[in-house]
Amino acid sequence: MSCANSATEMRFPFLWPLIGIFFAWMVLSLIFSRPLATGVKRFLYFGVPLLILGGLLMIPLAIGALVVLCWVFYLLFRVLQLLTIKDEWLRKNLLPFGVNAVALTLSFVLIFVTTSRANSTPGLIASLGKLGPHSTGSVHNLMSHLIERGPEVVAPLSAALERDFERSDHVSPYRTVQIAYCLRAIGGTKAEAALKETVEQRVTFQDRYKTRWETAVCYLYAESARERAVPTLMNLLNSAEGEQAGQQKLAALLALTRTQDLEAVETVLDHADFLKTQLLGKNTPYRHASPISVTLQALSEGQSPADLSASPVYEPMRLGLNPDSQTKTGINWDDDWNEELDIEALKVHWSNLLK
């Protein structure tokens, strides 16, 4: 995890006020103590350990570990001095050394607890959506830890997704899509059911600010359920109406392509004119035009069913997903692809491949 506290959402009641009060007391003791050396000593021996403990809650865990390591060497050096040099000054500082030792022990406990919680299933799920769309490598690394745990994390992932929708109508698009991606990658009937429920009950295309994650979830459901997703996606296609009808219809068609189902592919080919119109529209944004281009290219140049779901449609959405670079096909993807389609020939071609 990048940050121990943000990854685990740990809460330490009254910690920051206590640190503030303690720091203020240390500063006052530094200012008003006479001689000044006494105030400096109090500040260094008592204030610094507490400030380091507070810092471990904010700074990246790797830096925190480095700070603690330096701290360990410092204390070992001072203790060694205490044991080897019979010095009255050192004996008088046993109490500050004890405070440092206790604070150091608490630091190790803090790092152990936060690391354990960050790598637990609830900790990993809580971290989903906290990384921005430009951290695709970190996002996929985080999701891979959950995916490796297999079917046992499907239930908590589904529950987390449902809780997010219940808490607010405006869910995080990054978190929603990342949970859906994990469910798709793990697979199985329960994961598929969770994605289906999300598409049927949560995907409405009534709010243009939600269309990105709604579209991505449709794609992921299509890849997960394949031919079983066709009825749901067909219903989404046929029920498109209102201000966002074009976007709903477009998302349904592109998702149908990814099911690798013959009926779905024929439906998409029957709507090729609509896709072309959307592609060539003056106001069509890149995040819509690029998926259309590569989907039409997959239909035109694909030589296997897998090519239909290998087209790179996620990266233009800027949701932190970019699994497309891992797919291997014989197609040189072009997000500006705009060739003519022979609809009848393509229907025959895909009927032979998908029968």
Image (spheres, grey):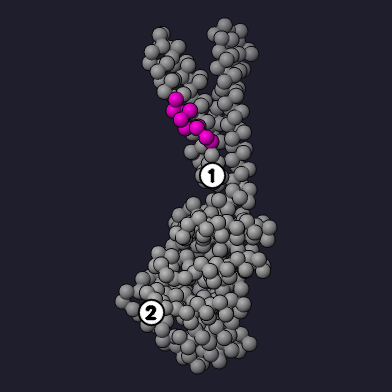
Secondary element at image label 2? helix
Residue type, mark 1 in image: Glu
- Residue in the picture at 55% in, 27% down: 71
Left or right placement of residue 293 versus residue 187 in this view = left
For this rendering, which residue is in front, 79 or 309? 309
> Which disc is residue 9 wearing?
1
Circles 1 and 2, Cβ within 8 Å, touching? The answer is no
Residue at 38% x, 16% y: name it. Answer: 31
Q: Nearer the viewer, mark 1 or mark 2?
A: 1
Callout 1: helix, strand or loop? Answer: loop
Going by the image, does 253 lie left or right of 156? Answer: left
Query: Taking 257 as reference, is 32 above or below it?
Result: above
Magenta stretch, main secondary structure class = helix
**Residue extending furthest toward the top:** 88
The residue located at (56%, 77%) in the rendering is 232
Location of residue 147 (image quadrant): bottom right
Residue 56 in the image, given as x and y percentages of width and height: 52, 35
Query: Does residue 133 show up magenta in the picture?
Result: no
Mark 2, other Cα within 10 Å: few <14 / some 14–19 / many ≥20: some
In the rendered image, the vertical position of residue 343 relative to residue 336, given as above or below: below
Q: Position of residue 227 (x, y in %)?
A: 61, 79
Q: Is residue 288 left or right of residue 188?
A: left
The mark that comes first in sequence, 1 or 2, is: 1
Q: Which residue is mark 2?
A: 278
Question: Which of the 4 image quarters holds residue 318?
Answer: bottom left
